[in-house]
Amino acid sequence: LIVPDNPIIPFIEGDGIGKEITASVRLIIDKAVAKSYNGKRRIEWKEVLAGEKAYNALGTWLPAETMEAFREYRVGIKGPLTTPVGEGIRSLNVALRQELDLYVCLRPVRWFKGVTTPLLHPEKVHVTIFRENTEDIYAGIEWNAGTPEVEKVLKFLKEEMGVAKIRFPETTSIGVKPVSVEGTERLVRSAIEYAIRNRLPSVTLVHKGNIMKFTEGGFKKWGYALAEREYGDQVFTENIFNKIKAEQGLKEAVAAYNEAMESGKVIIKDVIADAFLQNTLLKPEEYSVVATLNLNGDYISDQLAAMVGGIGIAPGANINYLTGHAIFEATHGTAPDIAGKNRANPCSMLLSGVMMLEYIGWDEAGNLITKSLETLFERGYATTDLARFMENGKALSTSEFASMIIN
Ligand code: NAD
C-alpha cells in the first residue's frame, strides 16, 4: 500500500488499559518514524471513538464517523474494547471486521530471546497465520434450543433432508458452518502472495477435511486448485508430488520436491488440524505460512502464541487485501483488573503497530522498534506480566518500559 509521507491514521484508544498502551505506542511509533526518516515522514494521528469512550460521549458503542474514518483512510489501529453486554452488538471487533469485510486475520508468531516459554527450542517457531475471518461456524449463525427457528430447522432436517442418524433431542441448539469457494480462495491467495513476497518456503492448509468433507475438505481442495491454477510456476503442491509419485515413483517425486525447494518455489501442503497442533510442538520448523478456517485459526493463533510465551504480546491485524483496508489491533482484552495502574504491557499493540508500519512500507521504522524490543527482552527488561517469569527479569511500569524502548 502506497501512502503519503504524512498519512492520516485513525486510532481507537480502547477501553481499560487501552488509554495507557495507546499513548505509549503512538509515542514510540512517532519517535521511530522520525529517527528512521530524519523527520521527513510523520503520522497524522486521528482519534476516532468506539467502546465505552464512545458510549459515554455519544450514547453509541460504534459511531458511524468511526466506520467512515476507517473506510476513508483505510489503515488504522485500535486498542482493546469492552464487549457490550445485551446491547444488540455481539462484539465491536466483529462489527468492524464485517463492515469493512476484513477477511484475513493475520497473526505472525515468533519468539523473543529472553521471554520464558514452555518449548525447548522456541527459536524454531516462525509462523504467520492467515485465519479466514468472515465464514465458518464462527460467523455467529446459530439458534438456541427450543426456539421456533430450531424447530423449523430440525423438522426440515428430519423430514426433507432425511437426516435420521442423529437423535436431535429437544435440548438441541443449532449452528451453521458456511464455507465458500470465494471465501477460501481470497484467503489462500493472500497467504500465497505473502509467502512469495517474503520469500517464505511454504504455505500449509490446516483443516479437518477428513471429517467435514464439504466445508473443511472443500477448503483444502479449493486451496490446492487455486494454487495450481493461479501460481503454477511459483508453487509446488502436495498434489503434484503425489501425481509424480504415482506415475514415476517416490524417488522422482522427492527429487522434484527438492528441486522445487532449491529453486525457491513455495511448497503448498496440507495437514489435519489436530495433527498440526501436535506437529507444531514437535517440529515447528516445518511450518512457515499457515492458511486456515476461522475456528481452527482461533485455536491455532493462541496455541502458537503461548508456545513462544507471547500470549500477552502477540500482535494481530484484520485485512482486506483487495481494498487495502486494514485494522491493526492488540489481541488481548481491556484488562480491567490492572487498568489505570501503569502496569499494562504495551507490546501486543506495539508489535501490531510494527505490522502496520510494514504494511505501509515503512519497514525501517518497524525494524527499529523490533530491534529495541529484542535488546530489552534479552536483557530482562519487561513489564511485570513478563518480567516475573524471566530469568533476571526486571519489572518496569508501562511508561518506564516505553521510555526505555525509545532510549
Ligand atoms: P483480558 O485479556 O482483558 O485479561 C485477561 C488477563 O490478562 C487479565 O489478568 C489481565 O490483567 C491480563 N492482561 C491482558 N492484557 C494485558 C496486558 N497488555 N498487560 C498485562 N496484562 C494483561 O481478558 P478478559 O478479562 O477476558 O476481558 C476483559 C474485557 O476485554 C471484556 O470486556 C472482553 O470482552 C474484552 N476483550 C476485548 C478484546 C478486543 O478488543 N480485542 C479481546 C478480548 C477481550
Image (tube, grey):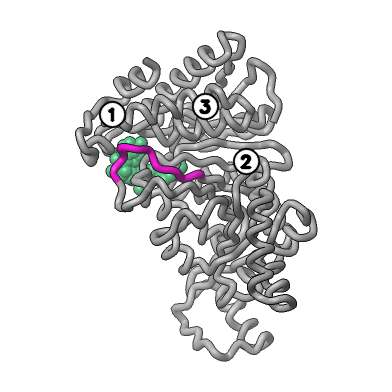
Q: Which residue is mark 2?
A: 198
Q: Residue at x 71, y 55 (%)?
A: 235
Classify residue 323 as left or right of residue 24.
right
Q: The residue tagged with tag 1: helix, strand or loop?
A: loop
Classify residue 276 as left or right of residue 360.
left
The kind of secondary structure the magenta stretch mainly shows is: loop
Query: Which range is magenta?
Result: 108-116
Is 113 one of the magenta-colored residues? yes
Q: Residues within 10 Å of mark 2 (few under 14, many from 20)?
A: few
Q: Which residue is mark 1?
A: 379
Residue 332 x/y as whole percent: 40, 42
Between 79 and 249, the residue placed more toward the observer is 249
Residue 80 x/y as whole percent: 44, 37
Amino acid residing under circle 3 = Gly
Q: Which residue is mark 3?
A: 366
Q: Residue at x 36, y 33 (%)?
A: 16
Amino acid residing under circle 2 = Asn
Between 8 and 246, the residue placed more toward the observer is 246
